[in-house]
Amino acid sequence: MAILKIARMGHPVLLQKAAEVADPTAPEIRRLVADMMETMEDAMGAGLAAPQVHVPLRLFVFRVVADRASGDPDDVAMPNSVVINPTVTILGDDTRLRWEGCLSIPGLRAAVPRAWRIRYEGVDTEGKPVGREVTGFHAGVVQHEYDHLDGVLYPMRMTDFSLFGFNEEIARAMAARS
């Protein structure tokens, strides 16, 4: 496996719609997924989409670590997972602000409105169906990674730019409030 180079904001691959994966079981897709998981772990990220590693294909990897899950029954810890050729369906009207960062936009965070409950579906590297209905952090990370497949970066979803800034400054402001 190998650590992959992450595309940074401004790179054209991040702003284009990714192509469907023709054969999710192909050896090169399995290698790409393994390398993406290693890269995500190395960067201590929650997710990584193929366009972020200069590959314009519709797949992403993600994980939900226990301390990030909301405790909602549909938002629990989840090991490293892959979704190839995903679809996302928003379930209900409940939208909440969610603090997000991005490996392609290092050092910054923002509060982004996201649907609280979604359903996602796709396949894994064996071509088997994957998906579920999820809420909270799990729903947010899937929406964030799915956006990458359509050339959308989280600042494009923002509605309040007063909730956007450098990680250190946001941490200081939050500490001052408490």
Image (cartoon, rainbow, N blue to C red):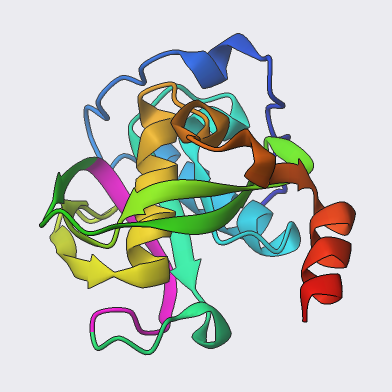
In the image: residue 121, left or right of residue 45: left
Residue at 77% over, 41% down: 106
Where 136 falls versus 101 (above or below)? below
Q: Which residues are magenta?
A: 74-85
Which quadrant of the rendered structure holds the N terminus?
A: bottom right
Rendered location of residue 107, percent (x, y): 81, 45
For residue 72, say whether it is visible. Answer: yes
Where 71 falls versus 99 (above or below)? below
Where 8 falls versus 145 (above or below)? above
Rendered location of residue 117, percent (x, y): 21, 63
In the image: residue 12, left or right of residue 124: right
For residue 27, say whether it is visible. Answer: no
Residue at 29% over, 53% down: 125
Q: Quadrant of residue 151?
A: top left
Considering depth in this image, is 39 or 117 the residue closer to the camera? 117
Residue at 18% over, 61% down: 130
Considering depth in this image, is 134 or 121 the residue closer to the camera? 134
Q: Quadrant of residue 12?
A: top right
What's the magenta bit mostly, secondary-structure-wise?
strand
Considering depth in this image, is 159 or 65 the residue closer to the camera? 159
Rendered location of residue 95, percent (x, y): 29, 55
Rendered location of residue 58, percent (x, y): 33, 32
In the image: residue 83, left or right of residue 172: left
Residue at 56% over, 86% down: 67
Q: Quadrant of residue 160?
A: top right
In the image: residue 63, left or right of residue 59: right
Is 115 included in the stretch rendered in magenta?
Answer: no
Which quadrant of the rendered structure holds the C terminus?
A: bottom right
